[in-house]
Image (spheres, grey):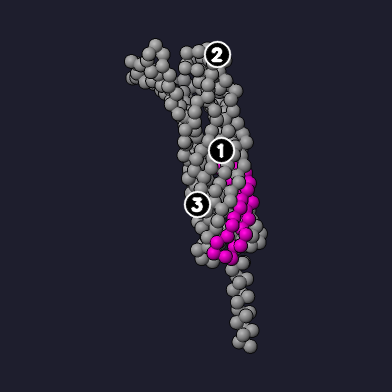
Amino acid sequence: MKRKLFFILLLALGAGNIYAQKGLSLEIIAQPGISFGGEFDVLQNLTSTNSWTAMDKSLTTNMNMGAELGYNFDDKMGVSIGMLYSHQGQNFSDYSWTYNNEQYVFKRSVSLNYLKIPIQFNYISTPVKNMSFIFSTGFYLGFLLSYTDENTFQYPNEPIQIITANGTTCTQTNGTKTESAAFVNGNPFNSFDFGGILSAGLQFKLSDKIFLPLMLNYQIGFSDVKNQASQFTQSNSSNAELFWQGSNNNSPNATLPYHNSSLGLKIGLKITL
């Protein structure tokens, strides 16, 4: 009789551990990683009117932080929806050239900050074990919170010239002189982004209700977030210029797309509710 009671107790405990994986869960997330953005072309040596070259991209770090609320249909499969602050962008290597034995340098960087809502399907291989394989896939909706598009020109024996697009204005600083222009037809970057998510990794069981997921997370943007129609003007729309074309009527940047993507290590602390 004692053996039967002991066996029933073990089954009940086992069922309790499996049941702990079902229902709601809350996961706090931090995801450091690498960000990738669109191409940007410059005039070859900035002295030609018909030869363009792509700037080399440099390492650009990013961070996602926030929380996800999950629901498991059974012990292995479920869905989740989250709310994350996401920093995206792309830095470029300095582009330098020599003209009349003098050195010129052009620098560029793009920073984009989003509120992202990821919606995912999740799979856990062996949730009752101390270590499980986990897999997630889905999509995200991104809403632009802020952006900075900065271009710096360093000419010999001249003040550094910085052109910065931020919010609803484009500011040009040349030494102590600053001029601002307002955007018309929208800002240079669209307010909405949409993309896919693919993640895989391991989940470590810290207790019956607390887990530590570690996953490689790849996000790829399906939307072109560049607003090619964006213009800026210092007085009225009659003298407005296309932001992505500027004074170069044949600039390929006017039509080059910009898609966000990132690769990061997703670190979570998941609590079953």
Q: Earlier in the sequence, mark 1 or mark 2?
A: 2
Q: Secondary structure at mark 1?
A: strand
Quarter location, residue 127: bottom right
Q: Quadrant of the N terminus?
A: bottom right
**Residue at the location (62% across, 36% down)?**
222
The residue tagged 1 is: 261
Q: Is residue 151 above or below residue 69?
A: above
Residue contact between numbered discs 3 and 2, judged by CB atoms under 8 Å: no
Q: Depth-wise, is mark 3 or mark 2 nearer the camera?
A: 2
Q: Is residue 167 visible?
A: no
Question: Residue 182 or 132: which is nearer the viewer?
Answer: 132
Segment tinted magenta in the rendering: 116-145
- Residue placed at 59% from the left, 68% from the top? 17
* Residue at which label 2 appears: 50
Q: Nearer the viewer, residue 145 or 199?
A: 199
Taken as a whole, is the magenta stretch helix, strand or loop? Answer: strand
1 vs 2, front mark: 2
Return the x and y of residue 20 as percentages of the image width and height: 59, 65
Count neighbours of disc 1 (C-alpha within 10 A) and say few if under 14, some if 14 to 19, many if 20 or more: many
